Image (tube, rainbow, N blue to C red):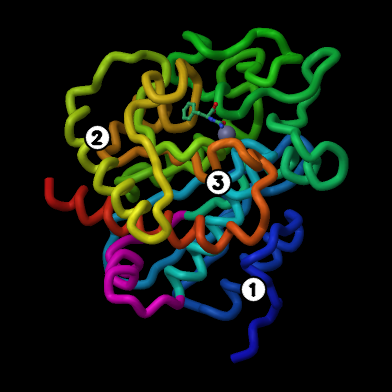
Amino acid sequence: AQPLVSFDLTRYHTLDEIYAFLDSLAKENPGKVQVIVGGKTHEGRQIKGVKLTLGNSKSGIVLEGGIHAREWISPASILYIVNELLHNNNADVRQLAQSHEWYIFPVVNPDGYVYTHTTNRLWRKTRKPYGLCYGSDPNRNWGYKWMSGGASNNPCSETYGGSAAFSDVETKSLSEYLTSISSKFTAYVSFHSYSQLLMFPYGHTTQHLDNYNDELQIANKAIQAISKRYGTKYKAGNVAETIYIASGSSVDWVKGTFHKPVTYTYELRDTGRHGFLLPADQIAPTALETLDSLVAMFKEAKTR
Ligand code: ING
Ligand code: ZN
């Protein structure tokens, strides 16, 4: 059938285009793709996503993208991966797609994402006014060990934690949605850029969790899979030791609240040559190598 909306997965898109694409996927794939709303924004937008049900499994995976507005490769890779999960006939990808339910939110900071298209390409935060400045860092505003390091109490800072935990409606409403589906998902994966890292909690402390060795082994399998396709090199470890101390992130909250065994954050391409301005011709390779790594990650996670 003809797609209802023609959508070029190898280009970057506006929020309206992305949301129209999600709507069209649901229309074209009844019973498989459902539009879901994970929350709302300060400027009144929805945090829109899709739920994919391609098999009988009830074990859910949440994919979170675009929490930082300027990291455009995150939503773009997620959309590319959605399309692969729906249409790729490779046995491993089909197995991965069918053996999970998928809750996928490509852009969880829609106001910020729109702002990067209209006004400031390098905007990171949300767009709620805090005194003279705008936005909290939505990856510092979650209510687990909030403001316990690597976050600022200055509203003008890029890593402002907000006036309280969940002071932004985006993090608050999304956390409520995640709580409502918490018995349905076993894995949470967040996508940022850039640095080519695959990390697991925590960010607020360098202390290792009980399952540190499992998490590292799963991550190492995943990054081996990444390098196989195009040679892209990643490093793996916990957030605090691998990138920097950071508290109030979504993944720390998910880990600290629900103790989900598989909770990861990708820092996608590149290592700084283009940084946030990654050329669109890298969307497809980034997404494909990342999907390879998800296949490896969930294969490895199943063995323990
Ligand atoms: N990096 C992430 C950030 O929020 C991170 C790193 C991931 C911190 C997970 C905490 C938890 O700073 C980018 N590039 O945004
Ligand atoms: Zn980020």
Q: How many marks?
A: 3
Part of the protein shown in magenta: 87-103
Q: Nearer the viewer, residue 198 or 17?
A: 198
Magenta stretch: residue 95 in it?
yes
Q: CA distance from mark 3 to mark 1?
A: 19 Å
Ligand 2, image quadrant it occupies = top right
Q: Secondary structure at mark 1?
A: helix
For the point 43% across and 69% down, the residue is: 85
User: Residue 47 vs residue 286: left or right?
Assistant: right
Q: Position of residue 130 (x, y in %)?
A: 77, 17
Mark 1 — residue?
Answer: 24
Quarter of the view holding residue 42 = top right
* Mark toward the start of the polypeptide (3 vs 1): 1
In which quadrant of the rendered view does residue 235 lie? top left
Disc 1 within 8 angstroms of ligand 2 (CB):
no
Which residue occupies the foreground of this view, 123 or 289? Answer: 289
Q: Is residue 111 left or right of residue 230?
A: right
Q: Amino acid at mark 1?
A: Ser
Q: Residue furthest left?
A: 304
According to the picture, the residue beneath numbered tag 3 turns out to be: 65
